[in-house]
Structures are given as structure tokens and as C-alpha cells.
Image (tube, rainbow, N blue to C red):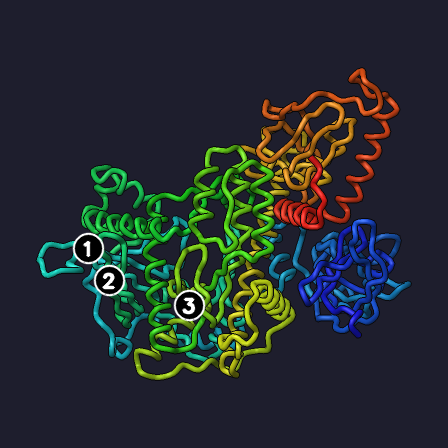
Amino acid sequence: MPDEIEGVVSGHRDGHGFLLRDDGEADIYLPPNEMRAVLHRDRVRVRVVRHDRRGRPEGRVLEIVERPPQPIIGRLLHEGGLWLVAPEDKRYGQDVMIPKGAIGAAKAGQVVVVELTEPPALYGQPVGRVKEVLGEVDDPGMEIEIAVRKYGVPHEFSEACLAESRALPETVRPKDRAGRVDLTDVPLVTIDGEDARDFDDAVYATPAVVSGRGKKPNGWRLLVAIADVSHYVQTGSPIDVDAYDRATSVYFPRRVIPMLPEKLSNGLCSLNPEVDRLCMVCDMLVTADGEVQAYQLYPAVMNSHARMTYTEVAAILANTRGPEAAQRKARVQDLIHLHEVFRALLKARQKRGAVDFDTTETQIVCDESGRIEKIVPRTRNDAHRLIEECMLAANVCSADFIGQGKHLGLYRVHEGPTPEKVDLLRAYLKALGVGLAVSDEPRPEEFQRIADATQERVDAEQIHMMLLRSMSQAIYSPINSGHFGLAFEAYTHFTSPIRRYPDLLVHRVIKAILAGKKYHLPALPTPGDAHEKLRKRLQKDRVQRGRDKGDPRHRISPEMQDWEAAGLHCSANERRADEASRDVEAWLKCKYMREHLGEEYTGTVSAVTSFGLFVTLTDMYVEGLVHITELGGEYFRFDEVRQELRGERTGIRYALGTRVRVQVSRVDLDARKIDFRLVHEAGDAVLRGALRDKAGGDGKPSAAKAVKSAKSAKAHALRDEAAERRSPMQALKAAVKKAAAKARKGGKPRR
């Protein structure tokens, strides 16, 4: 029936939930009584029965369409003679009853994995049995054990996969060298982080004549050598099946869940120093203006002449006569040539108008026992950028090669913002007084111009984040729609086959084209629910962009459908890996802040919502919420578009970038939430406008009105927080979207 809507349930820790619709439209609120018989992640059919005063739909569950097998992770408790498991993921909303004979060897307080034996009912809790005991909640690495199960990240290789990897050779054999270019005498080097263990790529550059008939070099020959994983991982083999299932390596602090068994990822495929390794090479001629004049792709054998780090290379480039350079005398001139190529490629990047925002990423530093020592920002230096530009050049050549070969493959596609997102961004920039806007069909350079113009503002990081969020997410697709952010007409991922499955597929396609053959995908598993949801969201994006459904690019052949499925699978699993990594990082930050309860810090308002302020601590890069009820005994009005809270009595305003002093008041490890209490402003909270008395004229509102305003503020805040507490950027996007919709209807946002 048309009024019946299907989707997936997303539970909320307060007992209610939401239906995430398959068609991508607005979520449907499910009250607590509707959540009694369903669980988070259930697929259900719902009918909308009413709308609240804000026009938000409320639904009634008609049918549970599918209950996916979902192990629940939680702590085993023994209360009043009953055994139960309190789910670690509070979105499940109900404890799971465990019969006495189903607890196995688990002990009270331990973290366990539960398998449901009876689903929840209107008047009964779910029942389950303990399937696995993970250990004590404070055991080192417990957060990772929970995350890989919570997000369904495959973390154990199959026996067939491990057996095949054990049978592989330890070194490159004579027969492996057949048909390959010998580059073992070329001084290729790897440049990675200090803690890197697998080395996908190596680089080398030398001056060369790239145009004209003269003998004087006017450009460079740039070699990017990438580990040849496809030589050892055959299509459809046990290793390939496991690699496809994972689709990507997942990186956590102190631990990596690799896509490939360690023998390959850290051994046979890794471009370790001073050992021969098989590789695929992108051999380019680069002009002084950073344009790739010509390129070749071919299989080769290489021998890395050095394993270098970003810190080391940056120090050498900064001082070619310093101590670091003295230790690497033989490599200094090669690094200078690489830096020259980098500057040329950077010139071409700026000419293209590619987007390049500086956002702060953090790194959690732990000691040997797993205890957090500190949280520090990740700094990007010229060595990081050098490698990035070299990899971009190789990826572009690979995409061009596949396109010229007229072969299906996976492109890394990043489309521009939808018309809806353009409207939201315009409203946001206008409200913040940014004197620049974006056109109806924006180009990357417009985004970069705004980023450059706002670089010195206190809310620069938030503006840059909003610019990023207004763009579409990059995905893998056989349909080449270009890469908006990088300003490339065609782009793919070629440079990391040890940790990304799409890169492995790209290598196979390139080899097939070189051999004059055609590569056929293996039989792949049917995409699951996450992939189906992603597919429908992408379809909605295409409709929003007004694409003609009759466009020949979208008449999908069976072979194209297979590549679409592979792209959706890899895109969805990339997001799964990101979510699991963020969950672990949030856990660790909460655990760290538990040791600092009651301490005071200076911070900056990083997001404003109707229920309070999200504040990021200046020196610790940890974010927490100052609830609106902690701001004082007056009514604070939320301006959706300006993203600020304004006190009606005092006129004080808290906006993005406002500096405040806070105290750590509460840490909820299970919910991954940190709460702050406002101590006092650090000098940037602004009192603007005259103080007004809405009731009288003496500038002093009555005590009764002040109490009433405070109570009203608290009630509104609690309701809004229960319904809307999400990540700061989600809250910010929702507020701007809401204000833009109001403006389109003829209303005006509150000022």
C-alpha cells in the first residue's frame, strides 16, 4: 500500500526510535510503545499515524519484515537472582534475559556476546544465550573487540584463506620475474608514518626532457611503484573471498584489522627495504607546470633503497645539510627532485581549483599497557603532501588508462553538491556574514575561494567543515562522474591494494588491458542491507540532480550491475570501517576524560544546537556538551541559521568559535558522551544589543518571568535533546536545513 513505508529501525537510548526509510525521505519517529516488540536494526513496515506540531511524522509498526542475525554485545549482570545482559549499544533499548543454563563460563560484570533465542514481545523482554566471553570491561583493547562485533567487521580469516597464504613463497621467485621490467637498480624509496607496517607505494624522480628537442631537462620522470597484490591474490581464491568480504583494512589505535593475511600485508606484498618485490608501476613524464605529458603502466620488479618517514623527509627538505640529511646522503638529491616534482604538481592543483581544506585530525597516543598518554593533532608536512600529489598523479593516469581501454572498472567518484545542499550552504554562509556564495552549479574553486577567505576567522574550522559536508561523499562506481573535490575528470584508486579492495580490482583491470584481454569479476555475494540503503540514497541523489532516467549511462547491463554491486559493497564497507574507528576513538576519549573529572579547561564552541553547545577543548581535542540548562537561569533562544544561542534577558550570545571555560562534569562511556559545565567565558562571549524587558520598561524582567523562562528553556532543551542529540555536525546540518525549508515557505528564521 502507498501509505506503508519500509525501512530499518534505528533505536534511541531513551526508549523511542526512528525508521530510516529506504526512499531516503525524512525519518519517522517511533514512540516507546512501538519499540517494545522491535529491535534496533530490524527491517519493518510502518504506517504514518500522525504528525507533531513541527510536522515530524510518527509511525506505527505494522510488520517486522526481517530480523537480521545480530549478536548483541554487553555486560552480564546478576540482579535479584536473574541473569541479564545490558547491551553496550544503548540503541537496543532493552536488556536481554539470560536463562541460568545459558551463561556458560561467563561471570557477572564481564563483556559478552549474546545470541538471541527469543525476540522481544509487547509484554516480554528478549531472551538469549551467551555465545562468547570477551573479558573484563577495562581489559586493554576491549573497545576494539566490542567495535568489530558491534559493526560486523570481519576480524578472523577463514581456514582456507590462511592455508593458501601459508603456501605462498617467502620471496620473489625466478618465475615471478617473467614479463616484468627490472627496476631493482632504481633507487625507489618508501615514505610513510613512523608506525606503518605495510608499505604499498614507493617513489622516485629524476630531471628529464619532456618537451621540445633540446637536451636540457625541462621536467621530470616520476615513477610511482605500487605493490603487486594481484599477482598473489587470484580472482575467486580463498584469500580473494576474504579480502572482498572485508573490502578495506580497519585502523584502530594500536591495532589494525588487515584486509589481507599478515604474510602478504606485512611480508610478501609489502615494499620492505632492501628486498626484491613485485610491483605495478606508473611511469610518468611531468612538465614544469605539473601536467603529466605522457605515462606508461607496466609490471616490474623493484628493490626499495630506503624505508623513510614523513618526519625524516620533511626535516631533510627543510635543511639539506642537517643531521637527518647527513644520515641519508645517498638519497638527498633524489628527495630534492621529488620535492621539485611536488611543487610542479601543486601548481597544477591550484590551477585546477581543487579543494584543499586544513582540518584538524587527532591521534591517540597510548603506552604499552594500552593506557592513553595524550591526544595530539596530526600535522601534515611537505612530505605528506609530496606523497599525496604523487599518488594523485598515478591514480589519474590509471583512470585514464581504463577509460582509454574502454574496460569496465571502479572509479573513485565524487560528485558536486545537490541543489538542496547548495541552498543550505548559501543560507549558512549568508547568516554568518561570509561575503562569498556559491553558484547554482558550483565549481571546486568556488569552495576553495571561500575557504581561503575565511581562513583567519575564529569559526574557520566550522565553516570549512560545513563546506566539506555540503559536498557528496566519495564512492566507488563503474560510472565515471569525475571527482569534484580534486577537480579531476576521471579518478580511481590504484595506489593501496594492500589495504583497499577497489585498488586490487583496478590492478586486475589494468593487467587485462595490457594483455589484450577482458577481466571478469568473480561471483560476488548479494549486497546486504547497508548496500541496498546506500544504493537508494545514491539513486535519490541522481534524481535530485535532475538526471534524465533515459540517460544511456544509466541503462545498466548485467555486467555493469555486477560492477555497481562491487562498488556499493566497497563503499558501504569503507563507511563501516570509518564508523568502527570513530566509535573506538570516542570510547578511548571518554575513558581518558574519566580520569579528569572535575578539572577545568579552555575550549571553543564547535557546534550550537537547540539543547546546548558542543565545546572542543583547546589542548586536548576532546568534544563534549554544555547542556542549555548549564548556561544560566534565563531563556536562551536558538537561531537555526546563525548557529547561536542568545539569552533573552542579558543578550549574551554563544556562537561558533566562542571561547569558553568549562569543567568536566560527567562521562558516559556506554553512550560515548562527555558533558561539561560552563565555568565562565574566556573573553569571547559577546554581549550584543540593548537589554530588553519584554514585560516592563525598566530593563529588569520580573522574577516570576525569569523563573518561567528558565523552566521553559529546560523543558524545550530536554525534549529537543531526546529527539535530536546527534553528532555536532549532524545537528548543525539539520538546523540549517530546517531554516532553509522555513525560508522557502515564506517564513523568516528568528534573529
Residue behind mark 2: 293
Residue 122 - label: none
* Residue 422 in picture, x, y percent from top left: 56, 52
* Residue 461 in picture, x, y percent from top left: 52, 40
> Do the numbered discs 1 and 2 sit on residues whose CB atoms are within 8 Å?
yes
* Residue 331 in picture, x, y percent from top left: 21, 50
Secondary element under disc 3, as helix, strand or loop, is helix
Residue behind mark 3: 503
Disc 3 or 1, which lies upstream in sequence? 1
Q: Nearer the viewer, residue 289 or 326?
A: 289
**Position of the C terminus by quadrant:** top right
Between label 3 and label 1, give the one nearer the viewer.
Answer: 1
Count neighbours of disc 2 (C-alpha within 10 A) and say few if under 14, some if 14 to 19, many if 20 or more.
few
Count neighbours of disc 3 (C-alpha within 10 A) and say few if under 14, some if 14 to 19, many if 20 or more.
many
Amino acid type at mark 3: Asp
Query: Compared with residue 20, is residue 693 higher up or lower down, i.e. above or below?
Result: above
**Position of the N terminus by quadrant:** bottom right
Count neighbours of disc 1 (C-alpha within 10 A) and say few if under 14, some if 14 to 19, many if 20 or more.
many
Q: Nearer the viewer, residue 466 or 428?
A: 428
Q: Distance from label 1 to label 2 (Cα)?
A: 9 Å
Q: Distance from label 3 to label 1 (Cα)?
A: 28 Å
Q: Residue at the location (74% across, 53% down)?
A: 90
Secondary element under disc 2, as helix, strand or loop, is strand
Q: Residue at the location (27% across, 39% down)?
A: 318
Secondary element under disc 1, as helix, strand or loop, is strand
Amino acid type at mark 2: Gln
Can residue 661 be seen here? yes
Amino acid type at mark 1: Gly
Residue behind mark 1: 219
Q: Distance from label 2 to label 3 (Cα)?
A: 24 Å
